[in-house]
Amino acid sequence: MHDLDELLTHCIRCGFCLEDCPTFVETGNELESPRGRIYLVRSALEGKLNWQDDVKPHMDLCLGCRACETACPSAVEYGAIFEMARDIIEREKPSMSKRALLASTTNPGILKAQLAASKFLPGGRVPNFVSKLLSGSKAEADLPTVQANKPLPTFETEVSVRGEVFMLTGCAMQVLYPRVHECTRRLLRRIGYVIRDVPQGCCGALHAHNGDLTTARKLGTELVRAFTGDIPIIVNSAGCGSTMKEYADLIGPECADVAGRTFDLSEFLLSHGLVDELAKAPGLGGVTVTYHDACHLSHGQKVTSPPRELIQAIPNSTFVELPESMMCCGSAGVYNVLQPEMARRLLDRKVGHIKETDAEIVATGNPGCHAWIAQGCREQRSARVMHTAELLEAAFVGLDGFVM
Amino acid sequence: MDFSTLEAILRPDQILSGAAASRGYDCDAYTVDRSKPSVIVLPETTLEVAAVVRWCAASQVPFTSRGAGTGLSGGAMPALGGVVISTKRMNHILEIDLENRCMLAQTGIANRRLTDAVKADGFHFAPDPSSQSVSTLGGNIGENAGGPHTLKYGVTVQHILGVTMVDPLGEILTIGGKLGCGPGYDFLGLICGSEGTLGVVTEAWVKLTPLPKAVTTALVAFPTIRSATETVAGIIATGTIPAALEMMDRGIMNAVALAFKLTFPSEAQALLLVECDGDDADVVAKEMESVRTVCESNGCLEIRIASDEKERANLWMVRKKGIGAMGRIAPSIVTHDGVIPRSKLPEMLDFVYEVAEAHKIGVANIFHAGDGNLHPCFYFDDRDPLQVERVIEAGEIIIKKCIELGGSVSGEHGIGVEKMDLMPLMFSPADLEAQAMCKRIFNDGMLCNPCKVLPNQRGCAEHKMRWRGVAT
Ligand SMILES: Cc1cc2nc3c(=O)[nH]c(=O)nc-3n(C[C@H](O)[C@H](O)[C@H](O)COP(=O)(O)OP(=O)(O)OC[C@H]3O[C@@H](n4cnc5c(N)ncnc54)[C@H](O)[C@@H]3O)c2cc1C
């Protein structure tokens, strides 16, 4: 496991992270930059600053997107520093409302009940009094709604089965985006893999990112127990995949093998021949597609090329790069509920770039980004958002089954 | 001091204060010296900067300009406290004039973004400090920054056509413009490299340079430091001026091997990165051929020529992020900056290794060999005050040697607070007084970035005790 003090020493203050940090780019404030935050954490650890008054506000505004890790030549593990600092802050003075938010978002039963109740809320937003309690400001994020979809055409393939995989069903994902799981299952089958269904829980990613390492470790340990053996684990949610690949650091050496057999769906599909299958597919009838890099996929897992290669292999479609595709959209787990103002600024920036591309579809590989960017695109009448898995499956069965 | 009256000038979100803010802005990338500001302001326009400076002048509060804070000599450290004026909200391009090959931008914009804006049209902003992905136009002007391509394209001053500046009393001055400076004395030359001591530059007209049509880049490995340094002298002697001629020694090679998985022959002790460019592909190819001949005659181990743009970009990333990668090896670094005649490179490098060893600190070298601009990078642990002392001492010895060999105390990182006291080694009292007179044309007080560049300023000696070596 990590030693915070040691992690901090790797920052030599060169500042190469600054222009890649969304909150620094938006505010120009050194304290809202990775270099500044690392300095504050180091100072608090040395007893020169106070965790709650001096450090907490700046750790709160951090998205945890880890773009700084991609920029950093010295391989400072900012994500780990961030989680450990938040853990210290939370343990010193726990925030009950934040805990409740995490618990409900990551518990499928509670989430479903909330969704049912939310139909009665004005404007489908988080009620302002709840938002004020959590963040002190007005709500920006619409309440999650379950993806509405028509049934997909019956599944056909001539490929024979050649192996088994696990799929992380996750917490929010299975409630909000059942269609993504359905597409994942179909795509895997198209390359000859079937999913071994096992009872499983939450991976603990949201807890880890929000300073509750104890719960994260507990959930992670249970999850690893569910995925026994050496079967590949397929994850279609970037934030979860990133945490699972780092279980060895979070939990301990007993999880050493997990990183090696956990794959983002796009990685697995690319390395197991989906491109060949796509070549035989009818494709997308000439639409223009762009791609938003989910932070925990690009920065957390360094997976940027596989989704692009797959999307570019879809017949009858045009791919355009999204400017600043690797900059966080502001969703960042529950960030858009806790920090609505900054989240909104980043969403507007993202949707502005999407409009510049004139793309009709934006693909992305994470439920948080999916919902948040979809909200922005809806408000500004821009592109439709699809999970990469949905887009790839649509290449085989057409877009009809995927309602906006 | 009552800073609350600043609220009449700026919105609350443009004013930072408190323990965390003072801490966050107490140094730049030179971490040996630190001094806290009381307040940091984030103005968005020239007018706002002028209002802040007038406030400082009226209240007799010192102020220091700051861009990205990547400076390596403490230039943006608020030596006497007071107000830090950050340009980081002034990051807009105001006008692009491709026909006249120039562009007007606010000075808080990162260098790289200037080029990004015109690259598709075949242009770039030529000054390319390794920090260009983040360091600002204002900081580049402040330090008259150079970079690997300085060898052929010159330093920042050659690419600035005009500036808008707020002087230390809060007056807005315009010097030069779209068409450069008119006849008369070259004030623009004086502003470039003045390290924020003459005022706050808020906007600048920069020159746009066409991108060369042909570029070839080679990474060459050598068995000894000497064979590499002699190759540098040899290449220059042929009359070829490469676009860039950079050297890395084993210390940096270790860091970049870790950071970027760069591979090289195991017995290599030094690498040269050589780039030739121009509009005529044949000429460029011939230049590279002559470079190859010199490398081979000096016994190089391997010459790797980048086969495509991706490989080329990767080689440059390795070079530009080389110093940044030193955090993999040690918790802190001090990157020195001295100049020597190219012919003295072999002797000087031997000296650097000796000094580092005698002071029990690590050293790695990555530098602009073509210009004889040395950057010994000491790596150490700044939590240990004894190491900090040794690092400061070793640095001074090295700079003294540069001057002895007929070189300079600084090539491009500036004097800041780091090398103020070394200035008399290079300049006579009369020289320094002449410089002080130049400074007084714009700045006749002690408020605008005090205690920088010139030694023996009134009131700085006692304060120095407070910041020197306060690395913790
Ligand atoms: C890893 C690394 C590599 C580097 N490589 C190079 C290199 O190759 N070549 C090179 O020359 N330098 C290099 N540097 C040093 C540094 O990046 C440059 O000096 C750069 O120009 C500083 O820009 P900045 O925006 O960070 O300025 P800051 O550090 O914020 O300020 C630098 C100085 O300029 C003044 N200043 C800033 N803005 C203004 C303004 N608007 N008006 C007036 N004065 C102002 C400040 O007061 C200060 O004195 C490197 C630094 C690092 C950390």
Image (tube, rainbow, N blue to C red):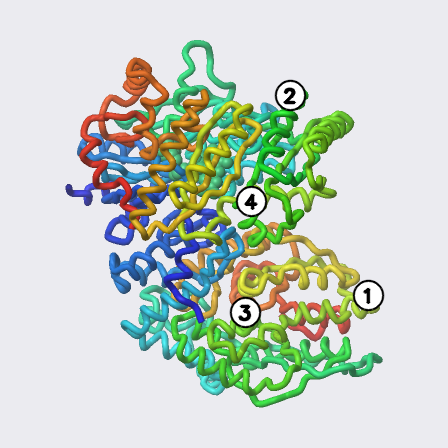
Judge: label 4 CB < 8 Å from ligand 1.
no
Drawn side of residue A110 relative to residue A304, left or right: left
Q: Name the kind of residue labelled 3 in the image.
A: Ser
The percent position of residue B38, horizontal first and vertical second, equals 23, 44
- Seen at 33% across and 58% down, the residue is A42
Q: Nearer the viewer, residue A178 or B296?
A: B296
Q: The residue marked by circle 3 belongs to what chain?
A: A
Q: Nearer the viewer, mark 4 or mark 3?
A: 4
CA–CA distance between discs 4 and 2?
A: 26 Å
Q: Nearer the viewer, mark 1 or mark 2?
A: 2
Picture quadrant of residue A317: bottom right
Q: Are marks 3 and 1 on the same chain?
A: yes
A222 shown above or below B135: below
Q: Which residue is mark 1?
A: A279
Q: Which residue is mark 4?
A: B250
Q: Nearer the viewer, mark 3 or mark 2?
A: 2
The percent position of residue B336, horizontal first and vertical second, equals 43, 36
Q: Nearer the viewer, mark 4 or mark 1?
A: 4
The percent position of residue A52, horizontal first and vertical second, equals 27, 64
Q: Which residue is mark 3?
A: A242
Q: The residue marked by circle 2 belongs to what chain?
A: B
CA–CA distance between discs 3 and 1?
A: 30 Å
Q: Name the kind of residue labelled 2 in the image.
A: Ala
Picture quadrant of residue B49: top left
**Is disc 4 surrounded by few (<14), some (14 to 19) or many (20+) residues within 10 Å?**
some
The percent position of residue A146, horizontal first and vertical second, equals 55, 78
Q: Provide the secondary structure element on which disc 4 rests.
A: helix
CA–CA distance between discs 3 and 2?
A: 53 Å
Q: Are marks 4 and 1 on the same chain?
A: no
Residue B378 - label: none
Q: Provide the secondary structure element on which disc 3 rests.
A: helix
Q: Nearer the viewer, mark 3 or mark 1?
A: 3
